[in-house]
Image (spheres, grey):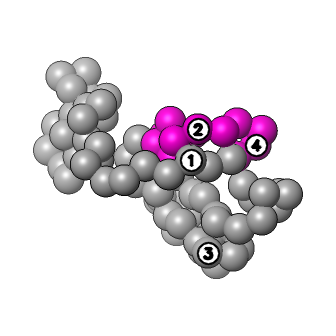
Amino acid sequence: MDGLLKRERDGSISKGAGLLAPHVRVNRQGRQGRFDDVIGLGFVVLSLDADPESNLSPSSKSALNDLGVRFAAFGALDSPHR
């Protein structure tokens, strides 16, 4: 498959994709670990203080979900979007 991320023959994202960046430890929904291990590989829309999906139209959310985009927000550990 063509695209920005290196993929395996079965279409899955290669484990080597994106591994050159520093990895910070994060907490999300009771799980703690390196960002890619907790959030997952691929495209992620990040927000500094709010649910990033809250600013998207239903059609934009649908299009991004169809592409496998993940959403995450930085902030307090007790926030419901983390």
> Quick one: quadrant of the N terminus?
top left
Q: Please identify the quarter of the rendering in which residue 51 is found.
A: bottom right
Contact (CB < 8 A) between labels 2 and 1?
A: yes
Range drawn in magenta: 28-40
Marks 2 and 3: which is nearer the front? Answer: 2
Q: Which mark is residue 25?
A: 1
List the residue tagged with mark 2.
33
19 falls in the magenta region: no
List the residue tagged with mark 4.
29
Relative vertical location of residue 33 with respect to residue 48 in this rendering, above or below: above
34 falls in the magenta region: yes
**Residue under the point 56% across and 47% down:** 25
Disc 3 from disc 1: Cα separation: 16 Å
Q: Amino acid at mark 3?
A: Leu
Q: Amino acid at mark 4?
A: Gln
Relative vertical location of residue 41 with respect to residue 43 in this rendering, above or below: above
The spot of residue 68 in percent (x, y) is 45, 46
List the residue tagged with mark 3.
48
